[in-house]
Image (cartoon, rainbow, N blue to C red):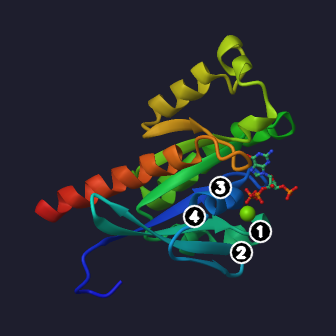
């Protein structure tokens, strides 16, 4: 974005265990966008996405991890300069460890990025019966438990998503983008 052009740019990092759907979610959200680039580099990849909020141009740089193995070494560069972050876990019964690991991703973000706006995505809801998430409070990933975790840790929100059907994807990303935009607006006047 050139200096004379009005607008905002936000780097958003998307973290979570391997195969929870990070790349698929980014692709789903940016699908059909006017301008996007998907650039893969060693260990991390990012896509650039433009959208408008209140008639103003917003550029999003969505970063995710390409290979968990190389990630340790790239951690610092990956996190640096992030405006906001998304933690993704999967509701697939075969990936229940991905929710157990959410606090680790949360600590990692805190350590490298401080208090930036965060959103929690519970992806792959298409693979389960969603009714169980509200009727079975004993389950670690029940609505009541995940919502409490998100509230306790000051997440902007918790969204159930499916990169396959598209359910919840736009709402979840937009919650973060709108918050980042609002914060940027306020600091313009500060
Ligand atoms: P990652 O970037 O977090 O590692 P990917 O995860 O986006 O590569 O997704 C891993 C696998 O999960 C992919 O399947 C992808 O199609 C699938 N997936 C992602 N999101 C969803 C979802 O919401 N629902 C379902 N059912 N599957 C999803 P493959 O078979 O290509 O490995
Ligand atoms: Mg990926």
Instruction: Using residue 53 as the reference point, say whether residue 84 is left or right of it.
Output: right
Residue 164, how many percent across, how many down?
A: 74, 48
Residue 76 in view: yes
Q: Are marks 1 and 2 in contact (CB under 8 Å)?
A: yes
Q: Is residue 100 above or below residue 180?
A: above
Of the residues under marks 1 and 2, which one precedes in the sequence?
A: 2
Residue 118, how many percent across, how many down?
A: 47, 48
Tell me the CA gap for discs 1 and 3. Answer: 16 Å
Q: Is mark 2 within 8 Å of ligand 2?
A: no
- The structure residue drawn at horizontal position 71% and vertical position 58%, both measured from the top left corner, is 24
- The structure residue drawn at horizontal position 63% and vertical position 41%, both measured from the top left corner, is 167
Q: Are marks 4 and 3 in contact (CB under 8 Å)?
A: no
On the rendered image, what quadrant is the C terminus found in? bottom left
Q: Which residue is mark 1?
A: 67
- The structure residue drawn at horizontal position 47% and vertical position 36%, both measured from the top left corner, is 153
Judging from the image, what secondary structure is the residue with disc 3 in?
helix
Q: Is residue 166 above or below residue 32?
A: above
Among the 4 quarters of the image, the one containing residue 159: top right
Of the residues under marks 4 and 2, which one precedes in the sequence?
A: 4
Q: Which mark is residue 25?
A: 3
Q: Nearer the viewer, residue 115 or 61?
A: 61
Q: Which residue is mark 2?
A: 43
Of the residues under marks 4 and 3, which one precedes in the sequence?
A: 3
Of the residues under marks 4 and 1, which one precedes in the sequence?
A: 4
Instruction: Using residue 114 as the reference point, say whether residue 95 is left or right of it.
Output: right
Judging from the image, what secondary structure is the residue with disc 4 in?
helix
Residue 106, how many percent across, how many down?
A: 56, 47
Q: Is residue 111 above or below residue 40?
A: above
Tell me the CA gap for discs 4 and 1. Answer: 21 Å
Tell me the CA gap for discs 3 and 2. Answer: 18 Å
Judging from the image, what secondary structure is the residue with disc 2 in?
loop
Among the 4 quarters of the image, the one containing residue 165: top right
């Amino acid at each position: 974005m050139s200096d004379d052009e009005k607008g905002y740019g936000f780097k958003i990092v998307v973290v979570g265990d391997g195969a929870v759907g990070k790349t698929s979610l980014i692709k789903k959200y940016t699908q059909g966008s006017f301008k996007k680039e998907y650039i893969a580099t060693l260990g991390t990849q990012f896509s650039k996405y433009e959208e408008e909020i209140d008639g103003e141009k917003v550029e999003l740089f969505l970063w995710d991890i390409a290979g968990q193995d190389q990630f340790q070494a790239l951690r610092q560069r990956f996190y640096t300069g992030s405006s906001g972050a998304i933690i993704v876990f999967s509701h697939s019964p075969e990936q229940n460890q991905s929710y157990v690991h959410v606090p680790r991703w949360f600590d990692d973000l805190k350590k490298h990025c401080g208090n930036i706006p965060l959103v929690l995505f519970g992806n792959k809801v298409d693979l389960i019966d969603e009714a169980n998430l509200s009727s079975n409070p004993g389950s670690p990933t029940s609505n009541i438990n995940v919502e409490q975790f998100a509230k306790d840790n000051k997440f902007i929100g918790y969204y159930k998503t499916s990169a396959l059907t598209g359910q919840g994807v736009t709402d979840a990303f937009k919650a973060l983008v709108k918050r980042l935009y609002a914060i940027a607006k306020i600091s313009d006047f500060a």
